[in-house]
Amino acid sequence: MTSGLSLGIGIAVLAVGTYLIRLAGPLLRNRLTVSASTEELMDRATVVLLVAVALTGALFVDHDFAGWARPAGVAVGILAAVLRAPLAVVVILAAATAAGLRAVGIA
């Protein structure tokens, strides 16, 4: 099997699987019931997963620490978002912080 063909098959399998999982939600929602505590646990698990992915992206490049500029930029962006700045301002502040720190030699 060529690598292009196996890549295409892999993409197709993932696409079909993703579609089936997304379709299962509305179809099974009325058939399955979960307790309130289970729903709360799933909501928390979603937040924990998203924070873990965001922190991994903010702190690491491949298997190495990303340096101090990127986490500082992310922290400034989070602060701006908490202070309810517009999205464009959040992105610009975060990028300018990281770029500024890198420009002065703090990688």
Image: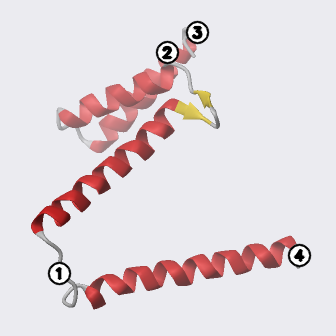
- Quarter-of-image position of residue 93: top left
Give the color scheme: rainbow, by chain, secondary structure or one colour.
secondary structure
Viewer-side residue, 30 vs 2: 30
Q: Amino acid at mark 3?
A: Gly
Image quarter (top left, top right, bottom left or bottom right) of the C terminus: top right
Circle 2 Cα neighbour tier, 10 Å, few/some/many (<14 / 14–19 / ≥20): some
Query: Tag 4, which secondary structure?
Result: loop
Return the x and y of residue 8 as percentages of the image width and height. Answer: 73, 78
Question: What residue is shown with label 3?
Answer: 105
Return the x and y of residue 57 as percentages of the image width and height. Answer: 50, 39
Q: Which mark is residue 5?
A: none
- Quarter-of-image position of residue 51: top left
Circle 1 Cα neighbour tier, 10 Å, few/some/many (<14 / 14–19 / ≥20): few
Disc nearer the start of the sequence (4/3) = 4
Q: Which mark is residue 101?
A: 2
Identified at 42% across, 37% down, the residue is 55
Circle 3 Cα neighbour tier, 10 Å, few/some/many (<14 / 14–19 / ≥20): few
Query: Tag 3, which secondary structure?
Result: loop
Question: What residue is shown with label 4?
Answer: 2
Question: What residue is shown with label 1?
Answer: 33
Query: Tag 1, which secondary structure?
Result: loop
Identified at 49% across, 30% down, the residue is 59
Q: Amino acid at mark 4?
A: Thr
Viewer-side residue, 27 vs 8: 27
Q: Amino acid at mark 2?
A: Leu
Return the x and y of residue 15 as percentages of the image width and height. Answer: 56, 79
Q: Residue furthest left?
A: 36
Image quarter (top left, top right, bottom left or bottom right) of the N terminus: bottom right
Of marks 3 and 1, the one in the foreground: 1
Identified at 33% across, 32% down, the residue is 77
**Gap between marks 2 and 3, in whole Å?**
6 Å
